[in-house]
Amino acid sequence: MTLLAPLAAHAQALKSDFAPNETQAAPRKDLLDLEFSPSRSMFTWCDKNGQLWVGTLDPATGNILKPTYKLLDTDAITPQEMSITTNGPEWVSTSTGDHVVYTKFVADPAKPSAARLALVEGSADGTTWGAPIMLGPNAGRNAPYASDDTGDTQPRISYVDAKNNHYWRYLYDVASEAPVLGMARTPKPVSVRFTKGNNGLVYSQDVNGTNQVFMEQLDTGKLTQITSDDGAKDVRTVPWMWRAPEYNNKLVLLSTVNENELRFYKGDGSGKWAVINSIMLPAGSTVASPEPFVYLGKSYVVLAVKSEPYTYPTAIYIAAVSPTATTKLWKVSDDADGHERIDPEVFITTQNGVVVFYNKFNPAMDPTGEQPTCAACSEGLFRATTGL
């Protein structure tokens, strides 16, 4: 695939005096795998005891407002049970606001066959929340990921069964459950993401020994292989697709290649896709948890990065999607301590621009010396400004 002609100058609002930074956002050690709802200025998570919560952020500063934590479910999913699902609660966007979808185990011991899909709905203003709703079917289902289209009248979720076969469905219609076309069973649950602004799913699959990215169009059942170029796509990550404002809201795909490159593709609306940009990570680095976001009409990616000699991510970066961006990739966290930084999530404030939240762990606190993400290793929730 060939690179498209350059765009006009990218009006990137990166501050000239920006430097990597970080501050502790909250000392709680079990604020793990937070997911943010921009429309509600809220976040959701499950604590060490498996209780499901939501909290509130100041939309101006991004500061966590206290006391605003609301308990949604006393028996949802513990950090240990997340080793089965590989994820915690997620936001699903609907016509009545963002709600929380998650895995709930209905029997002990926790195992895939005892997992069910559950939902808690919030009022329009987020002040009141209903009781947990079991979504069905009454069979092993876990690890839901949700569509993210504001005001969506047909919200969707993807998930796996007890044997890690992948499915999708409309949130409120259990009879709509259908297999994800062309996706093989996985050893563990893998997130299959919905295309934002387009009723589809994107995921990578092996093609003659090399992972390539596919899209299933859900309204037509059409399966399209988007990439066929060199390099293994999303071996340990997942592809993302959204409508990029700087490309006249055309669909853009983010895929990681050979674990050390961000590669972007744009669709022309007729089924043809072309590479529009490629960003190489620093030598010896490996990408983790990339996720795109849009700010002031431009698309960016937040990601965690593993750098030698570490075997875990130590730094948080931002990348600009446009090939004409004045700065294409920059570090936002102060990572001189070599501690683990994982699960970066962006929150856009009105006063401080784009801030990124992430969990931080001190490997020296692990009594076994093998796992930096041990409970005792947690240093709490951290945040960094991004320069945007």
Image (cartoon, rainbow, N blue to C red):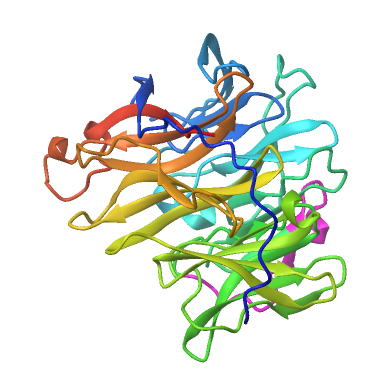
Give the image location of residue 57, x and y in percent.
Answer: 57, 19
User: Is there any visible trace of residue 30 in the rendered image?
Assistant: no
Q: Above or below — where is 302 with respect to 257? A: above
Q: On screen, 28 above or below 163?
A: above
Of residues 178 and 318, which is closer to you in this image? Answer: 318
When the figure is inspected, residue 351 is found, relative to residue 214, above or below; the finding is above
Range of the magenta residues? 169-186
Residue 178 appears in which quarter of the rendering? bottom right
Left or right of 150, for residue 21 = left
In magenta stretch: residue 108: no
Quadrant for the C terminus, please.
top right
The quadrant of the image that shows the N terminus is bottom right
Image point (80%, 71%), residue name: 268
Q: Principal SS element in the magenta part?
A: loop
Query: Along the line of sight, which residue is nearer the eye, 322 or 240?
Result: 322
Give x and y (percent) for residue 327.
49, 48
